[in-house]
Image (cartoon, coloured by chain):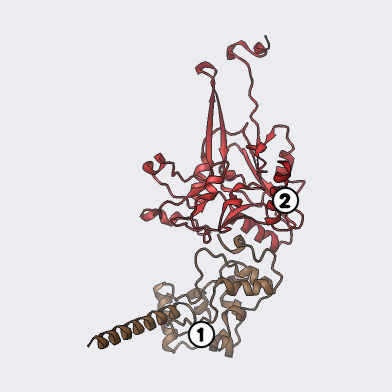
Amino acid sequence: MSGILTRIKDKLKSYRVPGYRTKFDYKWTMVVDLDRCSGCEACVVACYAENNLPVVGKRDCDVSRRFSWIRIERYVEGEYPDVKVKFIPIMCQHCDTAPCEIGCPVYATYHNQDGLNVQVYNRCVGTFTCATYCTYDVRRFNWFTYKWDAPLEQQLNPDVTVREMGVMEKCTFCIQRIRVAKDTAKDEGRKVTDGDMQTACMQSCPTDAITFGDMNDPNSKVSKLAKSPRRYRLLEELDTDPSVIYLKRVMDDKKGSGNGHGSSHG
Amino acid sequence: MKNLIIYIITAVIFVVTLGVGYLIADQYLGRAPEQPINFSHRIHAGDNEIPCMYCHSYAERARVSGVPNVQRCMGCHKIIKTDSPEIQKVAGYWDRKEPIPWIKVHNLPDHVVFPHKRHVKAGRKCQECHGPVETMDVVKRIAPLKMGWCLKCHGKYDVKNGRECWTCHT
């Protein structure tokens, strides 16, 4: 059994760009500090604005055709006086061994040299396989060609394509901003460092819960944050090797908040 | 009689195909639309040897090369050849404070990012894509501007990540 798994893994790796992670410059990574996340959904709004996501309306939301590339999952634990609410923003995890990449019959989703899992819209024929294979339910399908009402098409981001019916799409880690940052860095003859670019969700986050950067650079903010003991990745046991790292929310485990600390030790 | 109808139908299909082909060809290869002002690149860039980037000044620092504004035209033509009827048309736009509605000859689809800056800084000549503009009276598109045509160069020269989809596509 383990032999087969190893063989599958080797095969997956052979599909990748050769020399990935050593030959190329960047490994884009996002760190989400759940201790800071207040669940305000500013990132969701920013993502809609940045990436030309259509607002599909109530009817389509009811049949789970909502379009947010990033969503906030809410977990409520406990009964009323002792309620704990946890929020987890979930976007495309840009897995290194991505399940979606195996499924695509037309090679529309693949891993690029920066460690990004990217979707080529022009290749996509809409078989929905990648969304079925996706472990995190982050892929969104264009069921219709969505239209923007009269003044709203003026706010569309010119750097991002407006997708049409029958195309799968997902979070790109704001690749258009990465491209601009790389362009500027190339002019100045250096590599992209922290502060050169922000993703839309990171930029809008009021509590700075989201950090984005290059994992290959040992001095970048994300590399330092990734060493935190609170670090974990979603469904890591499935061996998808995601590029999004979450920092666990540490909550006081006391029962009965009025009694002060240490009451749970009994 | 039956044969005649078949001949007529064949002829109509033939003419329609030719017409559609002509329209498509006009849109793409060899596209040379008539501009609002009979501007000659041959006189400016060829005979008078004005460098491309004197007018298309954004080519070396932005994604688009930029159509020069009317002020750039009037900078010279306030003095030079003011009696020509074409220059008076330009002066008319200047007086009315209107931009000249130039027609785009090289138009890329929206899902393609083509930074002029990167190509100019890599040492590519304008003429490699735009053809010998300095000999043209009316600018004509000589390149097909298709992806295969792009990749010809991206294969020939050592372009970093040059064959990667998301380098050019959004």
* Frontmost residue, B106 versus A72: A72
Residue A107, given in percent of the width and then of the height, sits at 58, 58
Q: Tell me the subunit letter for badge 1.
A: B
Q: Nearer the viewer, residue B160 or B124?
A: B160
Vertical comparison of A70 with B70: above or below: above
The residue identified by callout 1 is B79
User: Which residue is painted at 65% across and 13% down in the image?
Assistant: A264
Colour chain B is painted in: brown
Residue A73 placement (x, y as % from top left): 53, 34
Which residue: 59% across, 75% down? B149
- Say which element carries label 1: loop
Which chain contains the residue that carries disc 2? A
Left or right side of B90 for B76:
right
Q: Colour of chain A?
A: red
Residue under the point 25% across and 85% down: B5
Q: Residue A89: percent from the left, percent from the top?
A: 56, 38
Q: Is residue B2 above or below residue B53?
A: below
Name, please, the residue furthest toward the left: B1
What residue sits right under mark 2 in the picture? A10
Residue B54 position within the rendered picture, expressed as x and y whole percent measured from the top left: 59, 77
Dot 2 falls on a residue whose secondary structure is helix
